[in-house]
Image (cartoon, rainbow, N blue to C red):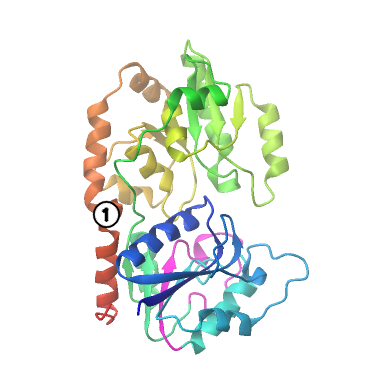
């Protein structure tokens, strides 16, 4: 009989970083012999027969949703392992975080807390007692050393398992994607692969694109994958209305298509738990101009070379004289740290460290 792992989060199945990494963990857990069930407040993909939808766990619960600890308790019943994806890490719905922590305190089984962010890392968020939870028979996993050290300073033993990627992804459809978004063959397309929310720093991306356009003979187009979230719709509309360069907002059919269609990726984010688009850009052999969020230092420590949103001239020099050998070297430097092929073994090692060698 297979072991059962239940993954629980605010939202699963979508394109946000937590949901993307949860899917990778699902694959790795299956490789380790687990059957997976999902529990969430929202599902952004096709719902499976054994999914459990608990609306009160959503980031923004629908009006009329009521907290129901018994429902969560029932959804976790029979789990050999519960994997908590950021629900008890970042209290963006503090009622859901606190309820989940309470139910897990009574749960008789192994629990892995997969921390993508932590309460004190986001200004303005509440910090409810017991988040992250302290309970026996638990494993705390962070996606970077920055958070692991912060947890350890607060008395938690934790292990770092960085987000993982296919570092040799399939090539996307460049010409068809550019045509679909109205880009001319000679346009210089800058891709901001992010939801439009304040910390993604859309104004800095526009400023970079505008400065680069002043240096370029070609037309420069900025492409934001979006959508706007966290009440950013009106702000984004004003920003776009004030821009002096053409801007398109919308998702391609696949990430591979988006990166294939782009000439340069721009990512001026001010805070990331990890920053998947940086690694995705490297994997797709695209140059990327970045901002300066703290965890980026860990990626730079691996020896990768990145452009800067503060240096449009440097980006233009790259575009005039590309260095594909640097892009390949960046991939090679990431392989020991971020390859998805290693994820099952990394999880197995972490489980062994927690005393769960039987898995």
Q: In which quadrant of the rendered view does residue 66 lie? A: bottom right
Which of the two residues, 277 or 293, is positioned nearer the viewer here?
277
Q: Is residue 242 above or below residue 50?
A: above
Q: Is residue 28 magenta?
A: no
Picture coordinates of residue 214 (x, y %)? 51, 16
Residue plotted at (38% across, 65% down): 142
**Disc 1 target residue:** 341
Which residue: 66% across, 69% down? 55
Horizontal side, residue 357 vs residue 136: left or right? left
Magenta stretch secondary structure, dominant: loop
Residue at the outermost right position? 64
At mark 1, the secondary structure is: helix
Q: Position of residue 16 (x, y in %)?
A: 52, 52
Q: Quadrant of the N terminus?
A: bottom left
Report which quarter residue 98 is drawn in: bottom right
- Residue at point 48% right, 79% down? 133
Q: Is residue 33 left or right of residue 119?
A: left
Residues drawn in magenta: 108-132
Where residue 173 sits: x, y (%)?
Answer: 43, 29
In the figure, is residue 264 to the left or right of 245?
A: left
Eyeballing the image, is 23 above or below 278? below
Residue 103 visible in the displayed image:
yes
């Amino acid at each position: 009989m297979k072991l059962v792992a239940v993954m629980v989060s605010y939202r699963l199945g979508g394109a946000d970083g937590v949901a993307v990494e949860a899917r990778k963990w699902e694959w790795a857990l299956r490789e380790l012999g687990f059957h997976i069930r999902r529990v969430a407040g929202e599902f952004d993909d096709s719902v499976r027969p054994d999914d459990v939808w608990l609306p009160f766990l959503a980031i923004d619960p629908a009006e009329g949703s009521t907290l129901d600890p018994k429902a969560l308790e029932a959804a976790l019943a029979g789990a050999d392992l519960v994997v908590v994806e950021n629900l008890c890490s970042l209290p963006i719905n503090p009622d859901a975080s606190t309820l989940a922590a309470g139910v897990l305190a009574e749960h008789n089984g192994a629990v892995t807390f997969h921390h993508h962010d932590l309460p004190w890392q986001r200004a303005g968020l509440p910090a409810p007692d017991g988040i992250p939870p302290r309970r026996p028979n638990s494993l705390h996993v962070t996606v970077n050393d920055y958070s692991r050290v912060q947890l350890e300073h607060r008395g938690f033993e934790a292990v770092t398992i960085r987000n993982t990627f296919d570092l040799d992804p399939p090539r996307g459809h460049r010409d068809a994607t550019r045509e679909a978004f109205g880009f001319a063959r000679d346009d210089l397309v800058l891709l901001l692969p992010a939801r439009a929310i304040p910390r993604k720093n859309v104004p800095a991306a526009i400023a970079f694109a505008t400065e680069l356009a002043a240096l370029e003979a070609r037309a420069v187009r900025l492409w934001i994958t979006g959508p706007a979230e966290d009440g950013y719709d009106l702000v984004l509309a004003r920003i776009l209305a004030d821009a002096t360069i053409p801007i398109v907002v919308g998702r391609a059919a696949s990430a591979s298509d988006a990166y294939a269609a782009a000439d340069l990726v721009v990512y001026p984010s001010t805070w990331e738990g990890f920053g998947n688009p940086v690694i995705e850009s490297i994997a797709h052999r695209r140059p990327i101009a970045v901002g300066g969020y703290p965890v980026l230092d860990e990626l730079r420590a691996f020896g990768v070379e990145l452009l800067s949103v503060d240096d449009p001239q440097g980006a233009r020099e790259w575009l005039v004289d590309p260095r594909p050998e640097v892009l390949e070297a960046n991939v090679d430097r990431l392989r020991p740290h971020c390859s998805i092929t290693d994820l099952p073994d990394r999880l197995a090692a972490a489980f062994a460290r927690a005393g769960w060698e039987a898995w």
